[in-house]
Image: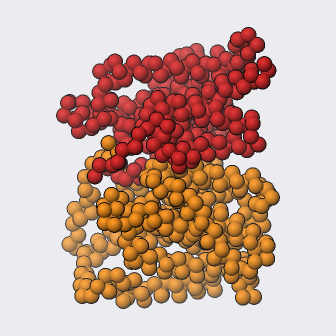
Chain colours: A red, B orange
Amino acid sequence: MDDVARLVQLVVNGAASGCIYGLIAFGFVLIYKATEMVNFAQGEIMMLGAFAAYTCVHSFGLNYWVGFAIAVAATAVFGFLLDAVVLRRVIGQPQFAVVMLTLGLAFIFRAGAGLAWTYDSVGFETPFTNRNIKFGSLVLGADNVSIIVGTVILCLVLYLFFSRTRLGIAMQAASQNQLAAYYMGIPVRRVFSLIWAISAGVSAVAAVLVSPVSLIDVNMGILGFKAFAAAVLGGFGSIPGALIGGVIVGIVEQLSGYFLPAGSQDVASNVVLLSVLILRPQGLFGATIRKRV
Amino acid sequence: MQLLFKTRYEQDIGLWKRKRDLGWYLLLVAGLLAVPMFAGEFYVGELGGLFIFAIAGVGLMLLTGYTGLVSLGHAAFLGIGGYTEAILLSKGVPFVFTLPAAAIVTGLAGIAIGVPTLRMSGLYLAIATLAFGSIVTNVFSKWDSVTGGFDGFPVKAPILFGLNLEGPTGVYYLSLAVLCFVMWVAMNVLRSPLGRAMVAIRDSEVSAQSMGINLALYKTIAFALSAAITGLAGALFAHYVRHLAPDSFEILLSIQLVTIVFVGGLGSLHGAIFGAMFMRLLPQGIALIRDDLPGALGRMPGLEPSIFGLILVLSIMFEPHGINGRWRKIKAWFSEFPMHKAAANRRQKSYAKSERLR
């Protein structure tokens, strides 16, 4: 019984960190589906969101939920401006130019955050810190449960947004066929910037959700590389795939840290990524289609 | 603008566009050979480092600039070359053999990563090489019995025909010789069918395939060649630092290598050299101005990577052809002097190109 409880605990911990990877991967996939750009700075945008929340909650002493909302909104505005000012200019350049551009941006964000806030690790008090939830003999951290619940709620909200609202459907249209969307009178450029805003906002939500579990520092963006594994696992074009991929990566990572020799936890996500790319390059949930010339 | 009239096919594939280019290059090499006679040890060492990065830059240029495959894991190849060199030397293998061996082992590693990633392009390849690089760095630090783990691995002195080449001057001449060799190889590859096939793959995989180019074969060759050249640079790097540590081959180094290629100018061997010059001179420049910067900015620990990032961003946004492109524009301006038209350099309006499958 003890073993089962331990296993469930590991799986829940893994699923919680997996949800974070999934949310970051969600950001990648959303941008990729719409603009075919890959944002290597997604992890750094999350880091900025975490620092924004830290400023609101810790420095200004605001209520946790108010700080949460302000941080998400601020990060979303930042994402909008990032697209409008920088990324819109490189449309039409080769894909890896955008990869390098966002990698460069990631370094700038890291240094900027170090300059604006601090290079030390910081954290702030949340309603979920150091609390436990008991299910019979099973004890789970409230922080991990809050991450999973928060992710599920966010996914529901986003699902409703994309399927029910005018703007959400316009976004779907713009990412399916830009030209047709233009003809239909959709302001494609503004829609793309809004997609960047949503993606940045989702990263900020991930950042606030993860803050009870891990400290905030400038190197937080490393999580973004693990999210790649999640996105690739899900096929890089599928939003539910990204989330499920994230959960799988998180659980694999936890279990390999427990059952396999030390150090395997660090490479687990990369090994998963490489093997998926080699064995099933279209991802677990994708389909192969030959490129049209 | 001086027009070049080509009368024979040999002129088209010749190594030099004009006879006098050869003269200029010989003059440059002669000048570089003389540098250690008057320059201080520090400058000689720095120039040696520059040559090593230029070699790695040429290797990556063949892959990224000419074949269009982007690799974010080249630091791993640099590391594999460096560790191969150091381990073989410590086993008592003479230096004459360790240097080619480092290139061969790294080339094989390149094939090992190239074959499974053949089906990928662009983005997926970048992510796969990124993962590969991070796995290799982990292996370097965890495989203590071979690599010495975090304690590092001391590199023995290179002895070539009884001549001890340790120290800045030895490494300088060694790297210069290897750089000349690598440039010679790269120039010859590029005018051979292999090089033409690589460029065709870069410009369009589909049309290259339709012309009868075996994509898998040529991509693997490009990967192996690029890895082998980078491995040579890694072996020299081992002698340059004299003590290998696993954390010197982190992702930051991979990104620096790609920055060399991008800032130098994609698709030109000159660009690889210009990029390496930029990459090695910038930290010195930053160190010089750091004291003059106001308070917090001067003491900022992340100043160097952020300036690298900024320059990378600016160069992609405003000068996609890099330093080499800017240099050619300046040359054109002088050669056309009073007749230069601003419109000559105007970029075509670019539209979103879809790499999507459907």
Taking A289 as reference, is B343 left or right? left
> Could you say which quadrant of the image residue B21 lies in?
bottom left
Residue B246 at what x, y percent from top left?
Answer: 70, 57
Tell me where residue B160 sits by quadrant: bottom right
Image coordinates for residue A92, horizontal then vertical, percent? 32, 50
**Along the line of sight, which residue is nearer the eye, A46 or B150?**
B150
Q: Identify the residue at image location x=38%, y=32%.
A: A195
The answer to whether residue B168 is seen in the rendering is no
Q: Quadrant of the N terminus of chain B?
A: bottom left
With A84 as the anchor, is A225 left or right in this view?
right
Residue A114 position, x and y percent, is 60, 40
Q: Is residue A272 above or below residue B4?
A: above
> Going by the image, does B160 lie left or right of B321?
right
Name the residue located 29 percent from the left edge and 71 percent from the top edge.
B333
Quadrant of the drawing holding the C terminus of chain B: top left
**Can you give x and y, in whole percent of width and height, for residue A154 in the image?**
49, 21
Q: Quadrant of residue B228?
A: bottom right
Q: Residue at x 64, y 51 (%)?
A: B135
Q: Residue furthest top?
A: A136
Q: Nearer the viewer, residue B241 or B198?
A: B198
In the image, residue A7 sits, relative to residue B149, either above or below, namely above
